[in-house]
Amino acid sequence: MKALCWNGTNDLRVERVPDPVLVNPHDVIVKVALSSVCGSDLHLIDGYVPTMRPGDIIGHEFLGEIVEKGPEVRYLNRGDRVITVSIIGCGHCGHCQHGESSLCDNSNPNPDYARTAYGHCGAGIFGYSHAFGGYAGSHAEYIRVPYADFNAFRVPDGVSDEKAVFVSDAVPTGYMAADMAGIRPGDVVAVWGCGGVGQMAMRSATLLGAERVIGIDRFPDRLRAAQMKAGAETLDYSRVDIFDALQAMTGGRGPDVCIDAVGMEADSGSNAVEDLYDRAKQAVGLQTDRPAVLRQMIESCRKGGTLSIVGVYGGLIDKFPMGAAMNKGLTFRMGQQNGQRYAERLFEHIRNGELDPSYLMTHRLPLDDGPQAYRMFKEKADDCLRVVFAPQG
Amino acid sequence: MASNSLTGRGGRWPQPDSLLSGLGSGLAGAGSGDAATGGRWLAMVGGTALGVLGLQRPGWGGAMMALGGAGLFAAGALGLRPFGERSLGTAQIPGAWRHQGPATRRRSLTPERTQAVVTIASDAGTIFRFWRNFANLPKLMPQLERVDVLSATESRWIGKSATPSATEAPNWRCVLDRVDEDRLLTWHTVGETALPHRASLMLSPAPGDRGTEVRLTLVYRVPATEVAALLGTSPAGQAEEALRRLKQRVETGELSTIERQPRGGTSGPFREATE
């Protein structure tokens, strides 16, 4: 089959690889119909995630049809149209049983990396480095899905592929960002990053009762989408001072909830010295992640407010204003998404017309265009919000 | 996985049971002459010296020294081993550590203790039954080819050769020491082996509804480097991997893996491969 493989920093190639096979009794094989790029893939491509190996198939957000199933798969059948949650849970450990499947104890077959770096090991993720299990990703014609009964969800009738595919990752990530922030009626929610996850976080915040939602980015097309599709007010961080603007918009209180949908490659936009400092330290390995958004959120958030972090961080950051966070009494919530907990609820929102993520798919391309597609996505060219590959043509 | 391991003799985890440390002293004691007897003599001689010194000093300080010396002497004389290991009869360890030939010469003076711990979302009975059948252990320890259960208490363990050049795979016989249903299992090697060791599996309820805490302790009488050379993994690696696999087997019925999955990087770009 064809697959899009990582072969080094900024080196993606479409290659011919063997088809996947059933390995464990709870596996299924999915024939991939749609597979989306994700902003977190850029961290792999840019070389910021150290446990990639040449030949790794990337991609983790996908929809397709089950073509083979293992003998212990009970609830799914061949021919089912399914999405698969990008972060793999076993369904049985204490974390999976309590709706924290991204913290699964069992799904990462290479726990030593994460245990060394983090103390404990989290779940495996499709196509997201060997620190997260080394599972083959979805930018391929077929993919093996482990613990399928827990991780794959039938797409309800009436929900199109274009809407459903994002229930694999972007929608639950954004929804969880809003959900774990504990939004209350009257809250003002600010979201840093108006990519796919940020867009979903803004819409989800409204669904969960936010009074006002403010999206922050610098790309006009993304800010426009935040206004038109997600119902947000917007701020261009390259044009305004974010702290001043947010205080002015909230009567000097600051947003009640601040959501980070950017992660480790953030820029402040307005403070050239800070950005230069962060980039220099990252370049020489004195920090792995650039925390510009975290600093802005801590400064801007109202006293006693909540920071909800779903942008991906991998390692260490520098100049983290812990004093401000402590003395303002902030609450931090964060984590990879627990999509298994939300998938059915999200399909209901889509069926009810309350949520339509299909506008994230600005480009639909064949897998052969993978390297160019990621270049376009990275450069935000052609108003690209998300490229979705159709490996079957 | 919430697993931690500690190698060597220190560590923040509690010892699983007095029996295991008792086995330690027993093993040392069986070695001949041994540290246990030496410890008792040391206590008695030291106690005498301290007592004499104390009696020569006037005042409360001297009296305290004399009392301490007397106590130390008494502890040594009664076999209480004030310098560490507690006494436990070696009779429970038939034949252990005696006449072990060449392995005896390599025997570590201080046992290499490793402990790993994990919480499993299951009841203790299920976990205990799985481990109690030693024939299951090759599923948890990839270093093992098989375990033959010889009787209710004896088993023969056949390892895999760590290196292709090895002439004989490591193997050893084990006997069970203690079977405390759903709580504790201890066993040790008997007869001649290059890997003399003892081990225990201890189960205890985790707080709340978190399942069962499982502690595996391995105590090798040869250095960890020697274990690694023969088994291909250190004692710490062996213990951690065994518990990781035990947890997966019990909780999910399978082991997570990426074996046999497709990957690129060897066939070159697709364009080249298809031309």
Image: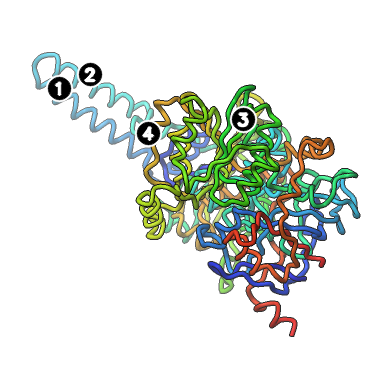
Of A193 and B100, the residue lying toward us: A193
Q: Quadrant of residue A283?
A: bottom left
Q: Residues within 10 Å of mark 2 (few under 14, many from 20)?
A: some
Amino acid at the residue labelled 4: Gly
User: On residue A212, which mark appears?
Assistant: 3
User: Could you tell me residue B233's position as x and y percent?
Assistant: 53, 58
Mark 2 and mark 1 in contact (Cβ < 8 Å)? yes
On the same chain: label 1 and label 2?
Answer: yes
Give the labeled residue for mark 2. Answer: B67
Q: CA distance from mark 3 to mark 4?
A: 67 Å
On the same chain: label 4 and label 1?
Answer: yes
From the viewer's perspective, is residue B257 above or below residue A55? above
Q: Residue at x 87, y 59 (%)?
A: A67
Label total for image = 4
Give the labeled residue for mark 4. Answer: B84
Give the labeled residue for mark 1. Answer: B54
**Position of A334 compared to B145: left or right?**
left
Q: Quadrant of residue A203?
A: top right
Q: CA distance from mark 2 to mark 3?
A: 78 Å
From the viewer's perspective, is residue A92 above or below residue A254? below
Mark 3 and mark 2 in contact (Cβ < 8 Å)? no
Q: Residue at x 54, y 27 (%)?
A: A256
Of B178 and A343, the residue lying toward us: A343
The chain identifier of the residue carrying mark 4 reads: B
On the same chain: label 2 and label 3?
Answer: no
Marked residue nearer the N-terminal end (2 or 4): 2
Q: CA distance from mark 3 to mark 1?
A: 81 Å
